[in-house]
Amino acid sequence: MESFVAHRSVSRLSTWLSLIVSLTFLMVWLPLLRSVFDGSSYQWGMNYFGFQLHGAGITPSYLFLIVQLVFYVALFVSMYRVQNRKVYYVLLLLWFVHIFGNLLADIAINGDTTFEGDTLGVSISLFWIVLPLSALALLLIFLAIRADRRASPQSIPWGAKNRKMLWLILGPLPIQAILLASGEPHGLTDQIGVILTIVQCFLLPLVVRPYGSKLQPQQEANSLKLT
């Protein structure tokens, strides 16, 4: 992983933006894992630009979740570790259209959009959440791109702390599988498994976050030879 260097350091803007992206990633990570661990007893669904997508366990619609997972991984990685910064800018704008464009379109057509979580007994109208959050996200995207264009290039290596974060954050997956696959549906074990998955969703960006200091000149030269 010596060539997997970060070309930008962590900033306050990138941290806030990562938090909002993680919040929207929850709509992917939770059904992605539960469809596997719970099987057909778990049902998910969403309205995507007028198309109704839903599934129970592993169905053809599950491919949509996988595509979104790949997209989010690319976005989280590009935030720090893609040298061509235009890739990051394009992914940010696509993310805004993918999430907030869809939610705003749903509100414009139906007057509201809701989030429902049966396991935790949650049913929330998103109208007054989506409007200010979309404005905040757009502002953060503008500020983040402007700051990123002015930032000095970095060469921060993938290190031991990144590997530690990877194991610590993804390590509980077997426990989540046991909790979600066993016990009564919507019962205590389900609720604990869902809470762990939600926390995990917000922690995942820490895996690719740059830690430590810049590469020394000789290390950087060796890294460039590998790319």
Image: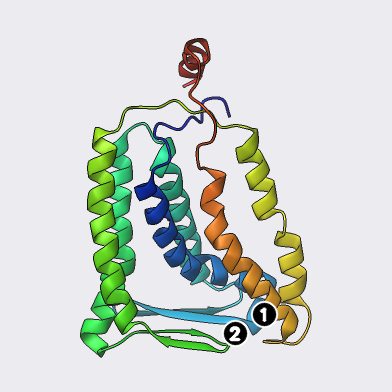
- Report whether residue 49 is seen: no
Which residue is tagged 2? Answer: 120
Tag 1, which secondary structure? helix
Q: Which of 55 and 161 lies nearest the eye of the viewer? A: 161
* Quadrant, the N terminus: top right
66 relative position to 112: left or right? right
The answer to the question of whether label 1 and label 2 lie on touching residues, with beta carbons closer than 8 A, is yes
- Can see residue 197? yes
How many angstroms separate mark 1 from mark 2 (CA)?
6 Å
**211 left or right of 145?**
right
Which label belongs to residue 191? 1
User: Mark 2: few, some, or many residues within 10 Å (few <14, many ≥20)?
Assistant: some
Q: Residue at x 32, y 50 (%)?
A: 91
In the rendered image, residue 219, in percent from the top left (x then y), is placed at 53, 15
Quadrant of the rendered image containing residue 145 = top left
The earlier-in-sequence mark between 1 and 2 is 2
